[in-house]
Image (cartoon, rainbow, N blue to C red):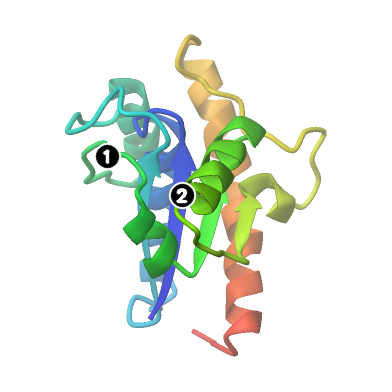
């Protein structure tokens, strides 16, 4: 089983949406026996909370359900997940600090937009203080990035639907 972890700051906007998009695509391609994902935040701001209502609404409009409660990344995640995808540079730095502080190693830590087909930025903007349009933009970024990331995974792990 290949495990993928999506990470943002609070785990209520970007990362649970990425997780839901990834799971939706994996299920639609009949790859659930091979790929599994989760999401978390680098902060402890929203532990136990449901995703932001705008995140849920945005996903639902695309036919995607989100079933997640906010949680914070921990050292067990570093050991258990094969791939860790951060939403922005700040989150990636915080993950690297956790790795170093605990004497761990992880060679598949990426910014998710590294996989996007065409991008004018390497970071997924945080839509928290924006309106629905900001959440729609994040959805589009994640949808494209995850399409390409999933293709990368299938090639890396010689998997076909």
Q: Which residue is mark 1?
A: 71
Q: Residue 10: percent from the left, percent from the top?
A: 38, 28
Quick one: 102 or 53, which is closer to the camera? 102
Label 1: which secondary element: loop
Label 2: which secondary element: strand
Upstream in sequence: badge 1 or badge 2 = 2
Quick one: 28 or 71, which is closer to the camera? 71
Identified at 30% across, 32% down, the residue is 56
CA gap between label 1 and label 2 equals: 12 Å
Instruction: Report whether residue 88 is seen.
Output: yes
The image shows residue 66, relative to residue 99, as above or below, that is above
Identified at 57% across, 85% down, the residue is 157
Q: Which residue is mark 2?
A: 6
Identified at 45% across, 16% down, the residue is 128
How packed is label 1: few (under 14 Cα within 10 Å), some, or many (20 or more)? many
Q: Residue 92: percent from the left, percent from the top?
A: 59, 42
Identified at 42% across, 35% down, the residue is 42
For residue 141, the mark is none
Quadrant location of residue 29? Answer: bottom left
């Amino acid at each position: 089983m290949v495990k993928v972890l999506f990470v943002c700051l609070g785990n209520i906007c970007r990362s649970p949406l990425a997780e839901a998009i990834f799971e939706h695509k994996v299920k639609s391609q009949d790859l659930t026996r091979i790929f599994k994902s989760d999401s978390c935040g680098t902060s402890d701001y929203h532990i136990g909370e449901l995703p932001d209502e705008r995140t849920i609404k945005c996903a639902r409009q695309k036919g995607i359900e989100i079933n997640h409660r906010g949680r914070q990344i921990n050292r067990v995640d570093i050991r258990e997940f094969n791939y860790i995808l951060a939403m922005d540079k700040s989150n990636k730095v915080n993950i690297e600090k956790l790795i170093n502080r605990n004497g761990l190693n992880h060679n598949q830590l990426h910014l998710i937009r590294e996989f996007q087909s065409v991008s004018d930025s390497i970071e997924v903007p945080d839509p928290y203080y924006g309106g629905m349009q900001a959440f729609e933009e994040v959805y589009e970024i994640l949808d494209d990035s995850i399409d390409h990331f999933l293709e990368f995974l299938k090639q890396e792990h010689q998997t076909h639907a």
